[in-house]
Amino acid sequence: MVTIGVLALQGDFAAHRRALGRLGAATVAVRKPGDLDAAEALVLPGGESTAMLRGIDRDRLQEPLAAFLRSGRPVLGTCAGAILLARRVLNPPQRSFGALDIDVERNAYGTQLDSFAAPLDAAGTLAGTPGVFIRAPRIRRVGPAVTVLARQGGDPVLVREGSVWAATFHPELGGDDRVLRAWLDLPSQEERAAAPAG
């Protein structure tokens, strides 16, 4: 199993570490550039993207993170992490890493009070996966090389471009691990149950 770095400057990084631990993955909290040395994959968690950017600047993580994103290793950005990965950020505009060819509108679903959970419209093992949306961004544009893996209400909510994935919801919450398993290319519970013994 890979060692997964989880950006741990602000937000729900502890929930990601717990969810990944349930899958048997080792995790390392990424707070300084050297923490990325042991990481074979990376999670940019939910939280507040502007606060994360301040922490990235303060702790000199901008270039080490950019280098990791260019390396081709697996990356998952959730909610605020999806904002950090986007090519373009709206409402208001802010800088991002541009690692994924999408445009994202911040807080597009409203305030914390407008948070909700809903099943995702997806194919295969991800069909019906519950999505937890908390002050979620909305993907407004998807580039030609980006694959939409799940939608909610017609909007793309889980996308990938190569090894970089983004979710506008929180797959680490709610106890359903199918999105994290798909990102890590692990068999789902249903696939494990259907596999022949031996």
Image: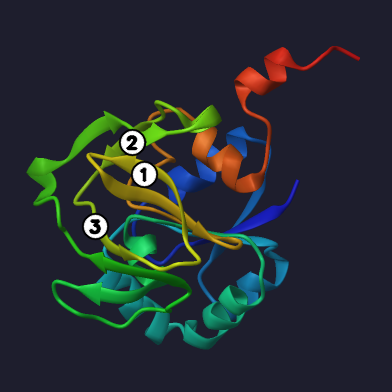
> Looking at numbered disc 2 in the image, what kind of residue is underneath it?
Gly
Compared across the picture, whether 64 is left or right of 159 comes to right
The C terminus sits in image quarter? top right
> Which one is earlier in the sequence, the residue at label 3 or at label 1?
3
Q: Does 91 appear above or below 162?
A: below
Give the residue pinned by disc 1.
Answer: 170
Label 1 neighbour load within 10 Å: few <14, some 14-19, many 20+: many
Residue at horizontal 48%, vertical 46%? 16
> Looking at numbered disc 1 in the image, what kind of residue is underneath it?
His
Give the residue pinned by disc 2.
Answer: 131
Residue at horizontal 71%, vertical 20%? 192
> Looking at numbered disc 3 in the image, what kind of residue is underneath it?
Pro
Label 3 neighbour load within 10 Å: few <14, some 14-19, many 20+: many
Q: Distance from label 3 to label 1 (Cα)? A: 11 Å
Q: Distance from label 2 to label 1 (Cα)? A: 7 Å
Q: Does 93 appear above or below 174?
A: below
From this viewpoint, is residue 178 visible? yes
> Which one is earlier in the sequence, the residue at label 3 or at label 2?
2
Give the residue pinned by disc 3.
Answer: 137
Compared across the picture, whether 72 is left or right of 180 comes to right
Looking at the rendered structure, the secondary structure element under dot 3 is loop
